[in-house]
Image (cartoon, rainbow, N blue to C red):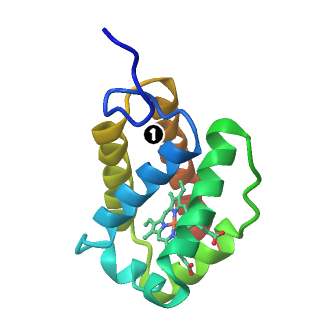
Amino acid sequence: MGVISRGDPAGDLSGRADIDRLVRAFYERALADPILEPVFEVLAITGLDEHLIVVGDFWEQILFRTTRYDGSFLPVHRALHGRHGLSPVRFERWLELWTSTVDTHFTGVNAERAKSKAAAMARSLERSLRSP
Ligand code: HEM
């Protein structure tokens, strides 16, 4: 087997460029998904490109600790929940799309962490939204 180049479909998530690719691929699918699309509508106003940088920072901090995510994770989703309802069905769909997007593009230790961290955070976010 030859050297696996960065961004090779069979390679692991290895840095910010890969995170950006993953996040963009996920959003392409989420924005076209009938269950999630109404919630992501807000990005038409706030701007997708800006949002993708914030989400990239978030994942870069989680996976590589090479940057600082300085956002407002809980308040943002609380507001979305109030406006649209982040229902269990939506959480399930979000996680399904995230997991399958990771699997489409990457394999390896960091890819596994990207999936397990997302599952844990989805669970804890869902729990936080249910409590006042
Ligand atoms: C039902 C599930 C979810 C939906 C529909 C959803 C949708 C959205 C939308 C529409 C935004 C942009 C809000 C805005 O700019 O006003 C957002 C922000 C964000 N989401 Fe989610 N999300 C979900 C779950 C998650 C989960 C489980 C994670 C992490 C594992 C996550 C990570 C983020 C991050 C990092 C931001 C940026 C927050 C900031 O501005 O600091 N989301 N989400």
Residue 97 higher or lower than 87, as above or below:
above
Q: Is mark 1 within 8 Å of ligand 1?
A: no
Question: Foreground: 118 or 66?
Answer: 66
Left or right of residue 15, residue 92 in this image: left
90 vs 119: above or below: below
Q: Residue at x 66, y 66 (%)?
A: 73
- In this figure, which residue is indicated by the disc labeled 1? 115
Q: Residue at x 52, y 81 (%)?
A: 80
Residue located farthest toward the top when viewing the structure as drawn: 1
The N terminus - image quarter: top left
Give the x, y percent position of residue 65: 73, 40
Residue 33: x and y in percent read 25, 70
Spot occupied by residue 7 in the image (x, y as percentages of width and height): 40, 37
Instruction: Please tell me how crowded label 1 is: few (under 14), some (14-19), or many (20+) other residues with Cα within 10 Å.
Output: some
Of 38 and 91, which appears nearest the observer?
38
Which residue appears at 54% of the width and 86% of the height? Answer: 46
Toward which corner of the image does residue 26 lie, by quadrant? Answer: bottom left
The C terminus: image quadrant: bottom right
Question: Can residue 77 be seen in the rendering of this structure?
Answer: yes
Please report the residue visible at 41 percent of the width from the left and 59 percent of the height from the top: 24
How far from the left and from the top, in percent, is residue 86? 44, 73
Name the residue nearer the viewer: 109 or 24: 24
Looking at the rendered structure, the secondary structure element under dot 1 is helix
> Tag 1: residue type?
Lys
